[in-house]
Amino acid sequence: MAVVEREKLLEVKNLRKYFPAGKKGVLKAVDDVSFDIYKGETLGLVGESGCGKSTTGRTIIRLYDATEGEVLYEGVDVHDKKSRSELKKFNRKMQMIFQDPYASLNPRMTVKDIIAEGIDIHGLAKTNKDRDNRVYELLETVGLNREHANRYPHEFSGGQRQRIGIARALAVDPDFIIADEPISALDVSIQAQVVNLMMELQKERGLTYLFIAHDLSMVKHISDRVGVMYLGNIVELTTSDELYEEPLHPYTQALLSAIPVPDPELERSRERIILEGDVPSPINPPSGCRFRTRCPHAMDVCAAVKPKWQEAREGHWVACHLYDEEAVKQQN
Amino acid sequence: MEKLLELDNLHVSFQTYGGEVKAVRGVSFTLEKGESLAIVGESGSGKSVTSKSVMRLLPNKIGFIKEGAIRFQGKDLAKASEREMEKIRGAEISMIFQDPMTSLNPTMTIGKQIMEGLRKHQNMSKSEAKERSINLLKLVGIPNPELRVDEYPHQFSGGMRQRVVIAIALACNPKVLIADEPTTALDVTIQAQILDLMRDLQDKTGTAIILITHDLGVVANLAQRVAVMYGGMIVETGTVDEIFYKPKHPYTWGLLASMPKLNAESKELLAIPGTPPDLMNPPKGCPFAARCPYAMEVCVENMPDATDVSSTHKAACWLLDERAPKVEPPEEAVVGGAR
């Protein structure tokens, strides 16, 4: 994708989100994360469970209040003190699609009322007829039809429910959508349907996506750029092609090599980097680089100093001492 | 090769409030000694029900084997009594479930749970069983097994718990191990560890594995033979190479095409339109006909027989009939063609 003078839609600056964990314990779910999202792009966020990717998404949209740091949406901080009406304005621009299509739709509301909730809150429809028409239009946009409007969520399959969730997000005509594992609960053939729909909608409406998932192959497919998270930090961020062709961070390398590929011959011949052990607890994370306890290239400096977030190549950011000349020199 | 397990025209149904759900409709396959067979399919395709029938773990009164035989070493498990089954479960055939948290008892130590089967099936003394438990934990790669054996499930991480579940399943040296989505609940780096472990253990113990999964990557990694299920039937079966490199059934094409490829340019994914059939009223003909881009009139009316493609490869599709037009699989379904 040719990128000239891109306009930043969202800037995340040193975002932290801590949760209390027992007596005096603090769970640092997101710990100093910074990135930008440009208008019209899809930024993928990947990582294993507990890495803080969902918390990042939820903090951006202010489902959680940030412990520290800023989230600037078109230059305005989302986490500033805001009146209800100010927040409302902002909520119209930013919407979310959730992972579990079974839990995220109110079972006692009809599909019409679910989709129209945002329309009602923001007063986007003047008459009942207008409201109905908008709902019908949205249903058709996501590949359902108007007969579905008066039904209840339990009458739909997982894929159809996710379409309803997408229609609900689109109802207020947002610019930016956070999709938190939108396809993880769906079957393979249905996943492709939903991803294709999301990509089409992006083209038609110029939407910007933050796409959070653990499935790297799907993230690569949908994203322009991808950020990799580990234990509350972003460790690498670059374009999706570059990330898959030349991953720099040892964690990204291991993550990519761990994915089983649907190609038996390749699976037989492939050398895997198998990481030892498990992800450490975010309540008491390792000092310095958080990945060092599992890293095959760990050096002494990794335990002492937290690696800098630096641009190792143009547009390719990484936090690892291996790419920090000073740190390597110190080590030798 | 020696036939270990043979399913012959198995039909399984569930009696529900709304009527009879025909979850499995005529499944036949054989499992040979020491091999690994993957059953692939989407939710509701009948893959888990098939494996639960082998263990006779269908919910009482609701689920029942309607027809067909499950022959294990000459014995028909479909007609076996509960007492006979108790001797087989865990000792001859054992099972690993998807969620390692819910398949372990939170109130019992890990050691006790491994010992349960050993004491019941192999009449081991307590100290013998404990020693064997420690060895099993070592075998599945749990550090400090002497200490961990006295710990409870909540003290283990997800990946470690799945290792414990595998240790329990292998405790009595079963001939068949049924693994129902063994890595679905795990993260990729942990999944890689567990797949590695399973392959390694199969080499060491010679246990035959039935792997139930929806993840074609896992299949390519672990299986030797594959059965693709759709709408309660096996629509295609073959060696792993035949299924991935020379698939014949349009549903298999659809599955392969709807997966994004890590090593290829991103094109639009070829999604399979529509949704799986309702098994309360299963279609008369081919279950995939309603979603199949190549469907002909005959497909809607008549179920195709399994046609031999090679001595190991079978597919149930009218396209393989000599009267049918010749159709090539879509480009997106070609695996590894770029290399």
Image (cartoon, coloured by chain):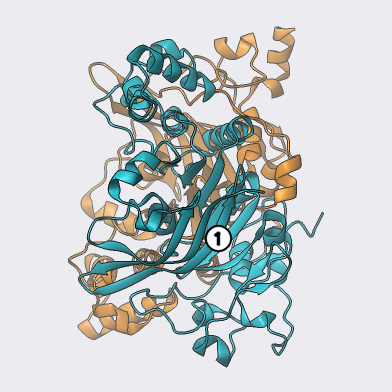
Find the residue positioned furthest to the bottom: B297
Q: Colour of chain B?
A: cyan
Q: Colour of chain A?
A: orange
Which is more toward the observer, B251 or B72?
B72
Image position of B245 with respect to B125: above or below: below
Q: Residue, x 31% and y 84% (percent of image)? A: A147
Q: Is residue A116 left or right of residue A275?
A: left
Image position of A85 with respect to A317: above or below: below
Q: Is residue A33 something one can see in this rendering?
A: yes
Residue B216: give x, y in percent of width and height: 59, 54
- Secondary structure at badge 1 equals strand
Corner quadrant of residue B228: bottom right
The residue where tag 1 is placed is B29
Q: Residue, x 37% and y 54% (percent of image)? A: A98
Image position of A256 with respect to B108: above or below: below
Residue B2: give x, y in percent of width and height: 63, 48
Residue A17: give x, y in percent of width and height: 36, 32
Corner quadrant of residue B35: top right
Residue A172: give x, y in percent of width and height: 34, 67
Q: Is residue A28 left or right of residue B295?
A: left
Q: Residue, x 36% and y 41% (percent of image)? A: A59
Crowd band around label 1 with a 10 angstrom C-alpha radius: few (<14), some (14–19), many (20+): some
Find the residue positioned furthest to the right: B339
